Amino acid sequence: MALKVNRREFIKITGAGIGGAAVAGGVGKVAYGLIKGDSGDDVITRVPTFCEMCTFQCAGWAYTKNGKPWKIVGNELDEHCYGRLCTKGTSGFGIYNDPDRLKTPLIRTSERGKQVFREATWDEALTYIADKLKEIKETHGPESVAMFSHGSGGSWFKTLLKAYGTTDFVAPSYANCRGPREEAYMNTYGEAIESPERTDMKNSKCIVLIGSHIGENTHSQQVNEFAQALRNGASLIVVDPRFSIAASKAKYWLPIKPGTDLALLLAWINVIIYEELYDKDYVRRYTKGFEELKKAVKDNTPEWAYPITTISPDVIRETAREMAKHKPSTLVHPGRHNVWYGDDTQRVRAGAILNALLGSWGRKGGFFIPESAELPEWPIPAYPKPKRSFKDTEAGQKYQLANLAISAGVCAATVHGVTGDAERAFYEGWFIYGCNVLKSMPQRENTIKALQNLSLVVVIDVLPTEITGWADVVLPDTSYLERYDDIRHSQGRTPQIALRSPVFEPRYNSKPAWWIARELAYKMGPGDYFPWKDVEEYLDFKLKKIGSSLEEMKRLGVKNLERTTPLYIGKNEDYKFPTDSGKIELYSETLKNFGFDPIPVYRRHDEPEGGYYRLLYGRSASHSFARTINNPILSELDPENEVWVNPIVAREWGLKNGQYVRLENQDGVVSNKVKVRVTERIRPDSVYMVHGFGSTAKNLRRAFGKGADDQELMTRILVDPIMGGQGMHGNFVTFRV
């Protein structure tokens, strides 16, 4: 029976989660797994987990009362959340209780795109997949299968598919979110930012956010450290066309003209260099190409930037001096969602260069040097070496600086074929794990075209999202509260490990990812890659190799390990960066050799025509894009999105607050109806929407038809020429009243 929680009760539960330690009061003595209430009437259990409501995987404790969901709180040992979960994290029981969940394996009985399936047994569904994979392998080669993945469970299928003979694993978040950030820092410092971000924000004295919506993008670690820095008196500079939650906390809010951020960054660099505000010793000791940079930005003065950005020269100079005043504890935040205008790698690289001038990399209050726990792997045979990979596709050849497969490139290679052989498609089969690719990638028609060209589409998910209708086989995954996953050991200040263990038995006829992958391996042949009898044996083996155990981790949830490297670069240390030169490359020979600007250069972007407005988008603090909009708890808190419209624009169009309109983009695509929010918090040349709404999946009864889908309006994509990122801020909309 599903737990019914009203809004007031949920707020109470959320408050307990934010408090972190609130659980201990009033519930009595704590023992592993079982807590007896003071009255002795209630049986309360506590199980360690880490959250799957977004990608940050905050560790926490899931409590049940008399066998039913009660509350989820953060684990105070965890550096991902410091014991404080966000609204999404405390609502994890919502997905467990969602009545719309996939309940049993399904096999398609009609054409792709129609939600017409028959129920199947697990043996029948897995046999179907195994037979198809054998056929593809014999006819086209194992490299003809790719996997789109988002979530912890995907690791089990990566093992399966590497054993099968392919390594083409696609994270849409690379090309459609964070990829430019990683490549920008790789081509400057020789290292990526990765996740959780290596930002030392809690110790920052000055923070610069450029289109980064901390507070609305509620990754707990970032929000907690951001709040701590502000409590400590840190100066905050926010660059954003919208008055965001972060902007409301800022000493300086710069409502920049969209598309001109690179011009502002170059002007800041100009001021820092020509007023000699940079960290001279750091630049001399650790950087390469300073003189070339100085010459390149000579004309990028605040006066030059003013008509481009609409930010006055005085403000540009004042904010540059503010950054310099607090160096090296100034953090120009690298952001997370970076695909905007097609110049994204170069724009983020300009921020990386600015951080170098301020001496913040490897310094307290800037960027720390992360460390992650090293976990041994269960001994398995060597994987077969693929004869070809994504690097051999047209996109792989074109974007050679990309370090991961590009989602749009995989779609294209599924349709257009192998390089040098246009008649043969590169990919014949897709696995899609926890990733609704029809909502996570723009230009939906290209994804659909690719799906129609495949011999096999397998979707493993918890909910019947838009993509399930295009599958040949749908496999119902468990929620993260019903399964074990591999040990979390992501980077941070402290090497940490965290355990996720099942709070409940799987509902309906769902199965955990580790079980599905293993059983499929047995049917296909490579069972040697899953030699353990069950996941508990697998986890206990790994944990004992580092001096822990599954039993211990069930008690602790999170364990800190000894750090073996310094947290920061030492004073006067002869530090070597992992670049070709061993130094921070302000002037990039690598980019030059590939035909790109070695130092970022601003180029003008298209502007909207009269009556059109640039479409900007972001996220709600209550949702992780489309992943959570059907959650019974979160959908009540935030059921639909709105379009933000400046009052000047509202008056021109006769729009009223709360009125429903449709949006039409520059290519004639019309959205679902969306509610107008008239606010001065957005520039008159732009409108703003939260991403992830406007579901077309009829089986998601809470989400279906609620709000408008900004992604269907993103028909114009500005591709980053360096790493293939898909910039989506080049779309303009008007109103259909």
Image (spheres, helix red, strand yellow):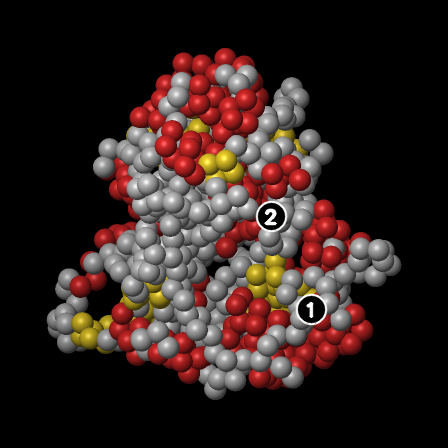
Residue 716 drawn above or below residue 472 = above
Q: Quadrant of residue 384?
A: bottom right
Residue at point 70% right, 61% down?
Answer: 389
Residue 398: percent from the left, percent from the top? 72, 47
Residue 574: percent from the left, percent from the top? 38, 45
Residue at point 43% right, 73% down?
Answer: 376
Give the residue at mark 1: 386
Give the residue at mark 2: 175
Pick the residue in front: 564 or 722. Answer: 564
Residue 289: percent from the left, percent from the top? 52, 32
Q: Secondary structure at mark 2?
A: helix
Q: Secondary structure at mark 1?
A: loop
Going by the numbered disc 2, the residue's amino acid type is Ala
**Mark 2 or 1 closer to N-term?**
2
Q: Nearer the viewer, mark 2 or mark 1?
A: 1
Residue 542 drawn above or below residue 196 = below
Pick the residue in front: 43 or 480. Answer: 480
Residue at point 27% right, 36% down?
Answer: 230
Residue 656 in view, yes or no: no
Residue 719 drawn above or below residue 447 = above
Q: Is residue 673 left or right of residue 277?
A: right
